[in-house]
Amino acid sequence: MHTILFATDASPSAKNATTTAINLAKATGWTLHVVSVWQVPVCEYGYLPLQYSPELVGIASQHARTTVEEAAEAAREAGVAATSEVRQGDAIEEICAAAAETSADLIVLGAHGWGALKRIVFGSVSTAVLHSAPCPVLVVRENDEQEELEPVGAGAARTDDD
């Protein structure tokens, strides 16, 4: 059985990646495994690490659960077999581990499309996964000017006149 692992955080940059992952799974007949990774937020204050309140940790965890449930449901509505899971930890490590554990044939994830300075400051999950993944990776870039893609089989057929 072939599997596409779709890693998402429900950010705007993941929107095109969601449609692309569903379209690929539908076109190939492969299973879509949706994963979202959350991490307990920690900030440094001097020498002491400070953790956020349990309420904020719960919100982060619930957001990840909602994210995978919505993406998996969208896939099922498009006729794609979909599973999902939520993982806690470093996004790069957990995405690559999930791909290895599920024997994924392909990882699909979005990219923010940030410039070099923002990537230096905030890092790039997509770039790190690209270099660490146990299988091929498709990085779907966010493009505000791009017409929103419809999942395969959704809506009426388009013509050149549309």
Image: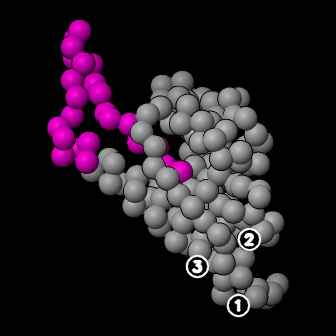
Q: How many residues crowd mark 2 within 10 Å: few (<14), some (14–19), many (20+)?
A: many
Identified at 59% across, 74% down, the residue is: 76
Residue at which label 1 appears: 156
Cα gap from disc 1 to disc 2, whole angstroms: 17 Å
- Counting from the top left corner in percent of width and height, residue 148 is at 63, 70
Q: Please state if 126 lies on the left or on the right of 138 as rendered.
A: left
Judging from the image, what secondary structure is the residue with disc 1 in? Answer: loop
User: Which residues are drawn in magenta?
Assistant: 35-58
Judging from the image, what secondary structure is the residue with disc 2 in? Answer: helix
Residue at which label 3 appears: 77
Q: Please state if 159 lies on the left or on the right of 111 as rendered.
A: right
Cα gap from disc 1 to disc 3, whole angstroms: 16 Å
Amino acid carrying label 2: it is: Lys
State the mark number for residue 26.
2
Asked if residue 144 is positioned above or below residue 40 in the image, the reply reads below
| 94 is within the stretch colored magenta | no
